[in-house]
């Protein structure tokens, strides 16, 4: 059942892109270029697009900073603030 659906998806991909009329070695080259392009786009998106601080917020919940592990973790309401002591 799964093999049949994968075979159908492959057939749809080949018909949509026009690969069905190529020889097998030509298909390997075209599919290699497509896979390499997808890998480069994924790499660029992961490493160079801004994440809006989502990763940093998730990691800071667990006490992680970019300079090492902070223990004990600061409470989320006081993160980044410093307490001022009155000694008078």
Image (cartoon, rainbow, N blue to C red):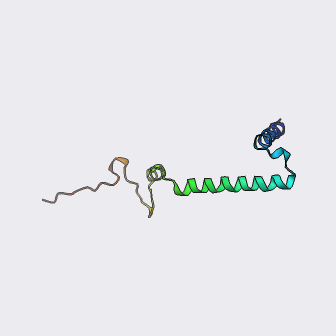
Q: Where the C terminus falls, by quadrant?
A: bottom left
Direction from residue 18 to residue 86 in the image, left or right:
left
Up the image or down, 10 lies above or below 36; here it is: above
Give coordinates of residue 33: x percent, y percent. Answer: 73, 56
Q: Is residue 77 above or below residue 69?
A: above
Please give left or right for residue 59 compared with residue 19 in the image: left
Residue 40, image x and y in percent? 63, 57
Residue at 51% x, 53% y is 49
Whether residue 1 sits left or right of residue 84 in the image: it is right
Please state, as top left, top right, bottom left or bottom right, where the N terminus lies in the image: top right
Q: Looking at the image, which is closer to me, 5 or 74?
A: 5
Please give the count of numbered marks on the rendered protein: 0
Which quarter of the figure has residue 66? bottom left
Q: Nearer the viewer, residue 86 or 9?
A: 9
Find the residue positioned furthest to the left.
Answer: 88
Residue farthest bottom in this picture: 67
User: What's the residue at 28%, 56% (across, down)?
Assistant: 82
Looking at this view, name the residue that lies furthest to the right. Answer: 23
Please tell me in which quadrant of the rendered image residue 73 appears.
bottom left
Q: Nearer the viewer, residue 53 or 77?
A: 53
Residue drawn at (86%, 52%) of the image = 24
Measuring from the top left, give residue 13's x and y in whole percent: 77, 42
Residue drawn at (55%, 57%) of the image: 47
Residue 21 at what x, y percent from top left? 85, 46
Left/right placement of residue 41 relative to residue 4 reads: left
């Amino acid at each position: 059942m799964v093999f049949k659906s994968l075979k159908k998806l492959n057939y749809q991909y080949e018909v949509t892109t026009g690969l069905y009329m190529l020889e097998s070695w030509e298909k390997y080259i075209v599919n290699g270029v497509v896979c390499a392009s997808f890998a480069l786009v994924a790499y660029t998106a992961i490493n160079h697009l801004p994440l809006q601080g989502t990763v940093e917020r998730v990691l800071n919940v667990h006490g992680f900073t970019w300079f090492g592990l902070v223990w004990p973790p600061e409470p989320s309401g006081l993160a980044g603030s410093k307490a001022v002591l009155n000694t008078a």
